[in-house]
Amino acid sequence: MIKEIKYLLFIFIIFLFLFLTIRYYFSDANKKNSYRSLNNIDDKIRLYSEKLPTLEDDTKNIIEYVEQLSNKKKKKFNFWKLLETNE
């Protein structure tokens, strides 16, 4: 008998917790607070972005092109031929 009462109490506590949690989550006060916090975050981001310093662009003419000499003969390696010669 006590075992059944204990299980019934556990189930009641679980359902009470779920009910109160869902009721608070869908309440108007919680929705207002969440929307206010989202608006505050947007305002803080906007203010912070206005205070950020901008850096000058110093990347002009930074790339140097190197011409490769076409006179050099490079030995072309073929993977399969290398395997055949090692037999």
Image (cartoon, grey):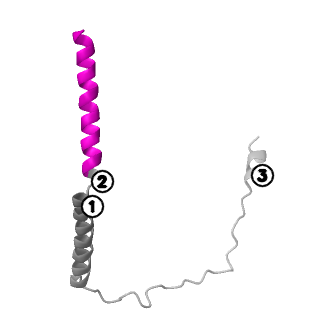
Q: Nearer the viewer, mark 3 or mark 1?
A: 1
Whole-number angstrom distance, CA of label 3 to CA of label 1: 72 Å
Residue 78 higher or lower than 57, as above or below = above
Q: Nearer the viewer, mark 3 or mark 2?
A: 2
The numbered disc on residue 31 is 1
**Mark 2 lies on residue:** 26
Residue 29 higher or lower than 52, as above or below = above
**Mark 3 lies on residue:** 81
- In magenta, the rendered stretch is 1-24
Residue 68 higher or lower than 10, as above or below = below
Whole-number angstrom distance, CA of label 3 to CA of label 2: 72 Å
**Amino acid on which disc 2 is placed:** Phe
Residue 53 falls in which quadrant of the image?
Answer: bottom left
Query: Could you tell me residue 29's position as x and y percent?
Result: 21, 60
The front one of 12 and 34 is 12
**Amino acid on which disc 1 is placed:** Lys
Position of the C terminus by quadrant: top right
Residue 15 falls in which quadrant of the image?
Answer: top left
Whole-number angstrom distance, CA of label 1 to CA of label 2: 7 Å
Mark 3 secondary-structure assignment: helix
**Amino acid on which disc 3 is placed:** Lys
Residue 47 falls in which quadrant of the image?
Answer: bottom left
Mark 2 secondary-structure assignment: loop
